[in-house]
Structure formats: structure tokens, C-alpha cells
Amino acid sequence: MKNHKLQLIGSACVAALICAGQLGCSKSDADSGKGSPGSSGGKTTLQIQGSDTMVNLAQAWAEAYRGVKPDVSIEVGGGGSGVGIAALINGTIEIATSSRDMKKEERAKAQQQSGKEAKEITVGFDCLAIYVHKDNPMNEISIEQLASIYAEGGNLANWSGLGGNVPGCQSGEIIRVSRQSSSGTYEFFREHVLNKKDFKLGSRDMNGSKEVVDLVMHTPCAIGYSGMGYATPEVKMLKVSAKAGAPSYPPNIENAQKKTYPISRPLFLYTLGEPQGAAKEFIQWALSDAGQKIVQETGYVPVPKQQQAKL
Amino acid sequence: MFPCQSSSRRSCKSRTHSRFIVSSPVTLVAARGEARPAAAARTAKPRRARWAIAAEKTLELIIRLCGISAIIFVLSIFYFVFVKAAPMLVDPGFSISEFLFSTKWYPTSEVNVRYGVFALIVGTFSVTALAMLIAVPFGLGAAIFVSEFCGKRLKEALKITIELLAAIPSVVWGFIGLTVMNKVIIDITGAPVGLNVLNGGLILALMSVPIIVSIGEDALKAVPDSYREAGIALGATKWQLVYKVLLPAAKTGLLAAVLLGVGRAVGETMAVLMATGHAVNIPHSILDSVRTLTATIAAELGETQENSAHYRVLFMIGVLLFSITFAINLTADLIVRGIKKR
């Protein structure tokens, strides 16, 4: 009798395996349909992904928004502006965050894939801060100096070339800390500091805004660039001048709004077509006083009312 | 009820066990026939329900599929990766020799896009080589100690700890490399930056040691005790026993352990992405930063437009990685065969 039982169990297992296989298939079919705002059990989910510079900001928004609209849950992801824009074009998210403009090819691709035009909403400003170790005696740097440190063919490789030795940095070599190529910060820096020239190979390409600051904090020889929202007391932000000899300005809210800081940039949200429904309500809230207060709290610069887009 | 009546006494005793060993009714009958020829003639036609036979056949088929699925998966993965990369091979702007031997990696340049992965290949090999230089002696030594020298209690404690070491996620290793090791390496060596081959190699070594230890220990355990007894009977010391008897007897398994360690090191992504500095650079010493093939795919694939040149080149790197691991495994296999022949 026992053997028959075992056979029964065996065939039940086979049946279960086959069923599981089919279930698995049909489930993945259902999964691939996500992309449009999913609502399950009365709860709407908004997916936001993109800029590493804006991850902290988007997360702070998501948390605060829970108190405003408890039935909307917001999922935030990073990866870099390029990753967010690619995901928006592919239709896997509703809102992309970006610290750079969408490129022509990307706009064309979005139009071609969805039939909708990408909509750009400025939600804040950032000063692209130049970070050095806190023991570094330097206080200011010009865009030209930055270009000859970072650009291909640039000849600044030692701190002595910038007029000083850094305590704790025995070799005197400038350790260039940069970002991976999917980063909007990387592209912004290349466009506005290197004048579209390529980066010198051999820079340490970090995978996030915070990693740049972390590495600079622990490395006396290092110089790096990242959003000013990531500043800590352990690192020093240099004043930046547009040209050698021109006045230099520290990265702060005032200099970003007056546009005196030479490498300040807008922070964007992108949607495909005019934002609708939950996405629209969220963006309107992000531009409201409550949302803009969070922009300031996370270390960035709010958008003045008259410059805000009408939704 | 039925197999017990007609089969030998031995299979009756361990009934459940025999059900898993005997794979089909045909062999069942054959085995019985050998045991008792007269009984075989009487039960030439098994009195079993048709559905039971069908179920067993299906089960056998599924198990067979499971067995060959590895081949199917490997081939289909290779096919998928290769198909994504292949159009680049006929692209006029792309040359395979530039891809393999140029150190200029500018996939997103606005002025001059260049795809040269030589520095990335050197980066992968330098980190892996350093990791193996550290991990192989440590791993095999630990395997020998755990298997042959230590007491029962210590053995259990060590095994649990080593398994725990294997369970640490690679991003945690990477984080340790980025924050802790970076500072330590700068302080000790005076290097300008602590994210380099040394950092990546140390972390990869720590990650592959558990694999080498547990598989190496299994290989040593598989050596029959009669070998040990014979060695001791001949008056060999414990060290002579290990060196002259156990290591040669277990060498295939030990090589497999080392190879899986190498595989882990070559394929590891997140930890090396964070710990090596991710700098396109040919290293001149172990204190230079490098970038590996895997880390490049991980950092860049997310932003590429599907089927763009950059996307295809990243898949080409995938094909390259695949070829590298295949070459390593093939060489090892040939070495093992060579050892066996001798």
C-alpha cells in the first residue's frame, strides 16, 4: 500500500510542477503589463527614477507626500539621469528625475515609442559643487583649472600646479573623482566645464553622488564634483570662478538664484505628455510651498514662483 | 506492496530508498530477472496500473530535462548575448582589434566615440590574479586544516563561520572596500587613493575563500579512509600523509575548488565596482586603480538605448567574459585529463 501512496505523491508532484510552470508563465505575462499607473486595492503607485543627485530629494518628497495623500505610494529609484530617462522612454516609470536636459535623440525616441512629447518641469536648482578634502588649503578654483584637471589633454596632474601641497597627500598627485557615464552630473560637467571635450581616462568613476563625497572625505589627494545637497562637514566646497582672475562664488542658494555661481543647473522632472492624474497632483504639490520647502531642506534651491511652469 | 513480493529481500528492507535509485520499470524487471530468473518468467508482464507507469515515465522525462537543462540554458544565454552583440561585428565603424587592444574607452563621447576594452581586460585579470594569489593558499590551507587537523568542535565552529562569510552580500563587501579599506590602505601604504587593485583583490579573496574551503574540504573528505589508514600504517607523519597521499588523491576536486573561486572572482561585479576605483587605467602597481569588464557592464547598461552601438558593445563585453570563463574551464579540464592519464 505504501508504494501506491508514494506513486500518488509522485504524480501529484509532477502535476504540481506542471501547474507551477504554467502559473509562472501567466504571472510573468501579467507583470509585463505594468508601466501605466498601477492601482491595486484602491492604492495608486507612482514610480519615480533617475538622477542620483535628486534621489534624496525624491525620497524626502515621497515620505512627506504619504501624509498628504495616503492612498498614493511613491517608489523612488536612482541609477543616474540617463537611466531614468531610458526607463521613462521604455514606459516602466511615470516620472523621471534628471539633472540634465533631455537630449534631442531621447526626445525623438520618446515621441516615436509613445507618440507623446516629453514634458519638462523645473522643480529646483543645484550648484554643482567642487569638493576637496577638509585639510586641503585651497579655497577657490576656476573653470579653466577644472578643465585642465579633468579634460583629455589637460596638463594639471599635481597639486603643486595649483599652488600648494596638501597635508596628508604625499605623492602630490591629484586624484580625480568623477561619475559613471549614465550620470546627469557627469554629462553636465562635461558640457559646461570641459566644453564637451572628453574626460581624461583614469578618473575614479563613482556610482553615486554620495560615493563621490565619501571618497573625497577619506582621500586627502582627491577632488570631486557632486550636487551641493551632499555636502558634509568633513569635506570642503571650493568657491568657483568663471575665469582665472574673475571673482569666485561659493555654492549657495543666493548665488544659484542670482546665477553668479558659474556651474548651477536646473533639476527636472520629466513625464511623457502632460502629466495626468496622480502624477499631475504630485508634481503640483512638489511645486507648492510645502514641496519647495523640502527642496531647500535637502540642500537645493527652490524655484521662484514666477519661474514655475503652469500645470 | 508489489515490488516487495517479487524483488529480492535487500530492496524490501530499504524500500523507500530503492524507489529513488531504480529509475524505470524496465530496469526494475531486469534487476529482478538477475536476482530470480524463475520469478522473472512468472511476472513477465508487470501487474502495474497504466497511470503509474505513465507517471513514472513522465517523472523520468522531467528529471532528464533537469539534467540537460544546464546545457540548454548555457547555449541559449550565449546565443542571446551573441545575437545582441553580433551586428556590431559588421559595423564599418567598429574594428575588433581596436576593441581588444585599444585602451581608449569613450562610449558616450560627444566628439569621438571609441570602444577599447584592453584596460578593462587587464583590470579584470590583475584583480583576479591578486585575489587568487591570496585566496588559493589560504583557502586550500583552511580546507586541509578543517578536513584533517582540527578537532570536531572547532571543525563545526569553523564551518559555520566560513559559511557565514559566504553569505555576506557583495554590495556590503563593496561598501567595506569603499569606506574602511580605502582609509586603511592610504594610511598603511601612503598611496594617494585606497581604491585600487589591492583593495579589490583583498575583497575578492575574502569572497572566494569560503567557496574554495567548502569545496576543497569536500574533495578531501571524499578520499577513502583506507588511503589514510594505509599511509599511517606505513609510518607517514600527518604532514607526509597530507602532502604525499591526500593532495594527489584529491587534486581534481581541489582544482575544481580553485576554479570555482576564480569564476567567482572574474564574475564578481558590485564589490569590484566599488572597491577598485572604477578607473580606466592600465595598472603599474597594485596601488593603481582599475576598472573591470563586469563593473563596466553594470555601470553603463542601464542608460543605453536598446540596440544602440554602446548597448551592443556592452553585450560584446559579455561575449568576451563568456569566452574568458570558457577558456579557463577548458584549460582546467584539459589539465585534469592530463593528470589522470599520467
Image: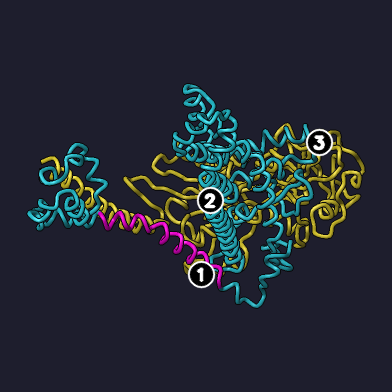
Chain colours: A yellow, B cyan
Q: Which secondary structure, mark 3?
A: loop
Location of the N terminus of chain A by quadrant is: top left
Would you name the residue on which mark 1 appears?
A: B83
Near mark 2 (Cα within 10 A), the count class, few <14, some 14-19 or many ≥20, is: many
Q: Which portion, as a residue range, is magenta?
A: B60-86
- Left or right, A250 with respect to B293, comes to right
Same-chain check, marks 2 and 3: no
Residue type of the residue flagged with mark 2? Gln
x and y, in percent, of residue B195 in the image: 71, 42
Which residue is at a point 55% across and 43% down the rendered structure image? B248
Residue for badge 3 = B190
Residue tagged 2: A49
| Relative to B294, residue B136 above or below | above
Which residue type does callout 3 highlight?
Gly
Residue A189 lies, with reference to residue A174, above or below; the image says below
Inspect the image, locate mark 1, and give the three-letter code of the amino acid beneath it: Val
